[in-house]
Image (cartoon, grey):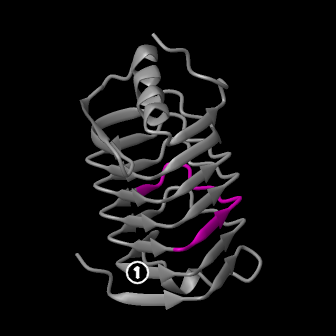
Amino acid sequence: MKPNKLIQNQYFSEENNNLAQYVICNALPGISFINCTFESLDFSGEVFGSCSFQNCIFNDINARKCLFSGCCLKDCKIINSDMTRTEFDNTRFINCELLGVDLQASDFDECELKETTFKNSRLGLIGVFSVKFSNSKQSIQIEDSLPFKKQDLYIFEKSLKDLNLIISTDSNEIDDF
């Protein structure tokens, strides 16, 4: 499904509540956001369906238990945000930075992470099924690692590190094994 609404150069915050007009039944359906900033917003439990985000900044957002389905994030930064138990289904991250993001117990299903970096992010208990990681030189495909075990987290983090897509996590550095 292609995004059916285009929103450009907007600043969204809890204070001005200007994003509420686009939410339908706790969902943001088919919206394309370009050059937008999302600041201190609570998206808990909301659904992002077939949305695209290009050159957007998410700062201090609460996206716990959200669902991103059929979405694409390109050239985006997610900073100091809580995305615990968030589900990413058929979602692409291209050239994104996740800085200080809590992704614990989140699931990545049929996703692609291309040139995407994680720095000081929490990645414990992540579920991964058919995820492709890539940088400009190589790619790694993880087909199935559910249920996710502690060693699987090391494989996930090591895959990101091997592709220079991870800088550090809450456990600092990853040991080679």
| Left or right, residue 25 beside residue 42 | left
Q: Residue at x 50, y 56 (%)?
A: 45
Q: Quadrant of the C terminus?
A: top left
Q: Seen in the image, is 141 located left or right of residue 43? A: left
Does residue 53 lie above or below 62 as drawn?
A: below
Which quadrant would residue 5 be assigned to in this image? bottom left
Stretch in magenta: 55-67
State the SS at label 1: strand
Q: Quadrant of residue 37?
A: bottom right
Three-letter amino acid code at disc 1? Ile
Q: Is residue 142 magenta?
A: no
Image side of residue 101 versus residue 72, left or right: right
Q: Main secondary structure of the magenta part?
A: loop
Residue under numbered circle 1: 31
Residue 93 locus on image (x, y percent): 41, 57
Q: Position of residue 60 (x, y in %)?
A: 71, 58
State the image coordinates of residue 36 (x, y, percent, origin top left).
59, 79
Q: Residue at x 58, y 51 (%)?
A: 98
| Residue under the point 63% across and 48% down | 82
Q: Quadrant of residue 130?
A: top left
Whole-percent x, y for residue 113 in the image: 38, 50
Which residue in the rendered view is the most extreme toward the right? 15
